[in-house]
Amino acid sequence: MTQNNQNYKNIFLIGFMGAGKSTVGTILAEKIGYSYCDADKFIETRAGTTITQIFADHGEKYFRDLESESIESLSTQQGQVIATGGGVIQRDRNWDAMKSGGITIYLQAPIEVIWERIKDSKDRPLLQVENPLETASDLLKKRTPLYEKADLVVDTSELSLEEVAEEIIRTINT
């Protein structure tokens, strides 16, 4: 296990779908001795159904309300690496919860890299459209300025998942 100075109550990983938040989060948590939480799985457990089903039955606004409640709940705990959903950055209340509950780290990658990672996924409700690449590209462009409000930005496109975790550790321990 890598040593950690534990200056941060929690570590919130933010970024677009396919940026590596879940996998990097698992590796990072293990290396620093924090617990790992996938915010989307947390929401699914609380709701008793999948995010895809939540979107289908209730729409995006309802999901975003559940997401905000979950982020606020998670931010009150400590010693966690939390992989957030890609759209968490769209609400100020989520930012407030994440900033008060720890550090935010944006896992960044260009659309070409992201598309290669997500193009075959069937469980991404926002991409169940006629032209998913165009939709993903537009969403990423729209969200990038919000992601960039993070405390730290790590480009994941040229690094292995292990290297991304090590880069985060190196940066937060300096």
Image (cartoon, helix red, strand yellow):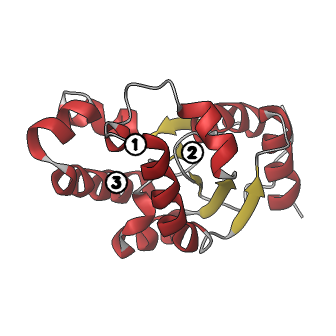
Residue farthest along the front direction in this orientation: 130
Which residue is labeled 3 in the image?
73
**Image vertical order of residue 117 relative to residue 134, above or below:** above
The type of residue carrying mark 3 is Ser
In the displayed structure image, the side of residue 54 where residue 109 appears, left or right: right
Residue under numbered circle 1: 131
| Label 1 to label 2: alpha-carbon separation | 36 Å
The residue at the point 59 percent across, 39 percent down is: 115
Mark 2 residue element: strand
Pick whichever, 89 or 119, lies toward us: 119
Task: Give me the C-alpha separation between circle 3 and circle 1.
Answer: 35 Å
Q: Mark 3 touching mark 2, by CB under 8 A?
A: no
The residue that disc 2 covers is: 80
| Quadrant placement of the C terminus | bottom right
Identify which amino acid the numbered label 1 is placed on.
Asn
The answer to whether residue 76 shows anywhere in this view is no
Instruction: Please name the amino acid that badge 2 sits on.
Output: Gln
Q: Residues within 10 Å of mark 3 (few under 14, many from 20)?
A: few
Residue 90 lies in what quarter of the image? bottom left
In the image, which is nearer the foreground, mark 3 or mark 1?
A: 1
Mark 2 Cα shell of 10 Å, populated few (<14), some (14-19), many (≥20): many
Question: As drawn, is 39 to the left or to the right of 31?
Answer: left
Q: CA distance from mark 3 to mark 2?
A: 12 Å
Closer to the N terminus: mark 3 or mark 1?
Answer: 3
